[in-house]
Amino acid sequence: MSEQKQQIRNILVTGGAGYVGSVLVPKLVKAGYQVTVLDLYIYGTEVLQSIKANPLLKEVIGDIRDQNLLKKIMPKIDAVIHLACISNDPSFELDPNLAKSINYDAFPNLVDIAKDSGVKRFIYASSSSVYGIKKEPYVTEDLSLQPLTDYSKYKALCEDILEQKRQNDFITLTLRPATVCGYSPRMRLDLTVNILTNHAVNNRNIRVFGGSQMRPNINIEDMTDLYVKLMTFPDKAIDGKIFNVGHQNHKVSQIAELVKSKLDYDVSINTVPTNDHRSYHISSEAISRELGFKPKHGIDGAISNVITAFSRRLIPDPMTKPIYYNIEVMKNLNLK
């Protein structure tokens, strides 16, 4: 066991029952960490079923806005991976006050309670959408932030808060992930790669709006492998750093063709006009250069995993079940 791993034994994952968290938490447990999950579990309590009996897992159903709860569970935590948020623009805009209270207002208290409780390392999942639309061919971490939506704006503002609270014994790291894709026990079918794969498999037709827009993506397996690896890096390698985390920047039309190529039956692709021509593209050269992070699975691997999950009937009723679509769940959620 490395010296760094000995230093970090107990990890709190906020949003640990979410799309990324439900893939990440089993990997952390497998690596030997004691993991506490704090989540509202609004997408189901069974997403961590494969490890529920493992003594290294502790599940807490609760709200990150609950300061008393945070003070109760934070002692003895060595590292926080903060994933919890109202995710994506439509869900945020459905109830902006609720979303702001979770994504932004709760953040300073979460960081302060972590610091006061002796947490050594705090990793924040921001978003590559904080850049807005850039003309530069490679969007690097030093470019200005011009978020286009409130969701992205508050992600950016939380980055500033975390930097202000950083100190020698409180190591902070901000990641700006591309759109995560692939299969998860808490499946989402409202993300570009997953949407196109769903329609190809279940409708044998992909409808592409525009198609020329660029979208950066990263396989959920690569994203979660990185979080696990970040527990082992020495402080000086990550402290105060901000890294883009992506893999491949593809046009939406290219993703559609890639999905089609993975299936052994005919799939039609229909392109229709759109008023949304926003393109996003990021460079992940910095994290590759400084931490040696090189994604292994890729977008084609994510597509294959989703196709396999459909064939194994792990995603029942994909076209009609609201649980796969964040905004549909939020519409029916009585959360204040």
Image (cartoon, grey):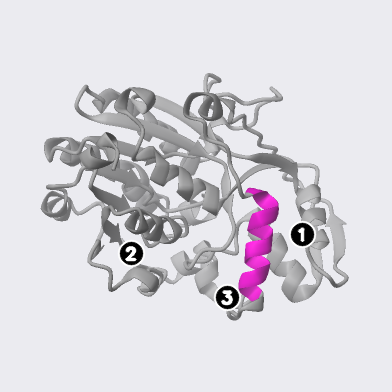
Give, as a three-letter code, the residue at label 3: Ile
Q: Give the x, y percent position of residue 40.
A: 31, 64
Does residue 177 sit above or below 269 in this rendering?
above
Instruction: Please report the residue visible at 62 percent of the width from the left and 45 percent of the height from the top.
Output: 217
Q: Is mark 2 on a helix, strand or loop?
A: loop
Q: How crowded is mark 3: few (under 14 residues within 10 Å), some or many (20 or more)?
A: many
Q: Nearer the viewer, mark 1 or mark 2?
A: 1
**Magenta residues?**
298-310
Is residue 282 among the parts visible in the rendering?
yes
The residue to which callout 1 is attached is 259
| The C terminus, quarter of image | bottom left
The residue to which callout 3 is attached is 315
Q: Which of marks 3 and 2 is in front?
A: 3
Answer yes or no: do the residues labelled 1 and 2 have beta carbons within 8 Å? no
Real-space CA distance between mark 1 and mark 2, rounded to the nearest whole angstrom: 36 Å
The residue to which callout 2 is attached is 335
Q: How crowded is mark 1: few (under 14 residues within 10 Å), some or many (20 or more)?
A: many
Real-space CA distance between mark 3 and mark 2, rounded to the nearest whole angstrom: 26 Å
Q: Is mark 3 on a helix, strand or loop?
A: loop
Q: Give the x, y percent position of residue 274.
A: 78, 49
| The N terminus, quarter of image | top left
Instruction: Please report the residue visible at 34 percent of the width from the left and 42 percent of the height from the top.
Output: 104
Q: In which quarter of the image is residue 227?
A: top left
Q: How crowded is mark 2: few (under 14 residues within 10 Å), some or many (20 or more)?
A: few
Instruction: Please report the residue visible at 52 percent of the width from the left and 19 percent of the height from the top.
Output: 142
Residue nearest the viewer, comparing 217 with 145: 217
Q: Is mark 1 on a helix, strand or loop?
A: helix
Real-space CA distance between mark 3 and mark 1, rounded to the nearest whole angstrom: 17 Å
Give, as a three-letter code, the residue at label 2: Leu
Q: In this view, does 61 lie to the left or right of 138?
A: left
Give, as a three-letter code, the residue at label 1: Val
Does residue 321 sit above or below 190 in this rendering?
below
